[in-house]
Image: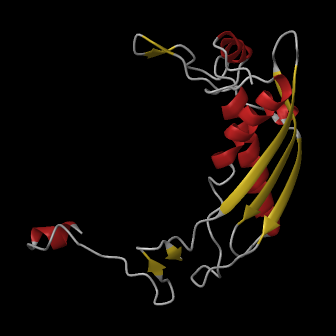
C-alpha cells in the first residue's frame, strides 16, 4: 500500500452499494424489503420482585429469534442464550458509575456482571426466513439478544409490582424512586 501511495496513487476510494435487483423498496408507501438482512426477535421475561427489598430476579426468559438461515444451530442458540444473559446483566446489574470524570467501578470486583448462577431458565425458539444473499441466506445474530431484553425486564417489574422503571439497571433504588415519583400504575 505504501508503494502505491508513494507512486502517487489515490488515497481515497469511493464505492456505492447497489442492492440486488430483487430488493425493491417503495419509499413513498414504505413497502418492500428495505433491510432484508436484519434479524428480528421478541423477548419475554418472567421475574420475581421481593416485596421488602425490591430486588429483582429473572426466573425465565423466552426468546423467539428470526435469524435468516441457521447455519450452525448449536452456535446460533448459544449466541442467543449468551446474549440474553448479557442483556439481563445490563438490565439488572451493570451500572457504570462515574464521579468527577473517573470511573468509580473500575474493576470486575466493583462492576457486577451476571454469572451462570444468575441465568434464569431460558427457552429459545429459532425461526428461519433466509434472505437471497450470502452467506447461504444467514442474517446477523450477534447483538440481536440485547435489543429487547431490558424493556422486557422493565415490563416484568411493572407487571409484578405496578411500578414503571424508566432507567436501567432496574435496581431496588430505581424501583423505589419510581414509586416515590408516582410511576405506579
The percent position of residue 164, horizontal first and vertical second, equals 70, 26
Kindly identify the residue that appears in the image at 70 percent across and 67 percent down: 67
Kindly identify the residue that appears in the image at 20 percent across and 66 percent down: 2
Relative horizontal placement of residue 80, taking residue 110 as reference (left or right): right
Kindly identify the residue that appears in the image at 24 percent across and 73 percent down: 14
Where's the N terminus, which quadrant? bottom left
Task: Name the one closer to the observer, 109 or 81.
Answer: 81
Relative horizontal placement of residue 11, taking residue 111 as reference (left or right): left
Task: Name the one closer to the observer, 166 or 64.
Answer: 166
The percent position of residue 13, horizontal first and vertical second, equals 23, 72
The percent position of residue 126, horizontal first and vertical second, equals 80, 65
Residue 57: image quadrant is top right
Q: Residue furthest bottom?
A: 21
Q: Is residue 182 above or below residue 42?
A: above
The percent position of residue 179, horizontal first and vertical second, equals 71, 14
Task: Name the one closer to the observer, 48 or 180.
Answer: 180
Residue 15: image quadrant is bottom left
Type of colouring:
secondary structure
Where's the C terminus, which quadrant? top right
Residue 45: image quadrant is top right
Relative horizontal placement of residue 143, taking residue 57 as reference (left or right): left
Task: Name the one closer to the observer, 72 or 172.
Answer: 172
Question: Across the whole image, how many numbered discs are drawn on residues?
Answer: 0
Q: Is residue 72 above or below residue 83?
A: below
Amino acid at each position: 500500500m505504501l508503494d502505491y501511495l508513494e507512486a502517487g496513487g489515490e488515497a481515497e476510494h469511493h464505492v456505492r452499494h447497489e442492492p440486488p435487483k430483487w430488493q425493491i423498496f417503495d419509499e413513498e408507501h414504505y413497502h418492500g424489503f428495505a433491510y432484508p438482512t436484519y434479524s428480528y426477535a421478541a423477548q419475554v421475561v418472567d421475574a420475581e420482585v421481593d416485596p421488602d427489598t425490591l430486588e429483582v430476579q429473572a426466573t425465565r426468559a423466552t426468546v423467539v429469534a428470526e435469524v435468516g438461515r441457521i447455519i450452525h444451530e448449536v452456535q446460533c442458540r448459544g449466541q442467543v442464550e449468551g446474549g440474553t444473559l448479557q442483556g439481563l446483566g445490563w438490565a439488572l446489574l451493570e451500572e457504570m458509575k462515574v464521579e468527577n470524570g473517573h470511573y468509580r467501578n473500575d474493576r470486575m470486583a466493583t462492576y457486577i456482571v451476571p454469572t451462570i448462577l444468575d441465568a434464569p431458565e431460558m427457552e429459545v425458539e429459532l425461526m428461519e426466513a433466509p434472505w437471497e444473499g450470502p452467506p447461504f441466506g444467514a442474517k446477523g445474530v450477534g447483538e440481536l439478544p440485547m435489543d429487547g431484553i431490558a424493556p422486557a425486564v422493565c415490563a416484568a417489574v411493572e407487571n409484578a409490582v405496578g411500578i414503571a422503571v424508566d432507567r436501567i439497571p432496574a435496581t431496588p433504588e430505581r424501583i423505589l424512586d419510581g414509586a416515590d415519583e408516582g410511576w405506579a400504575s
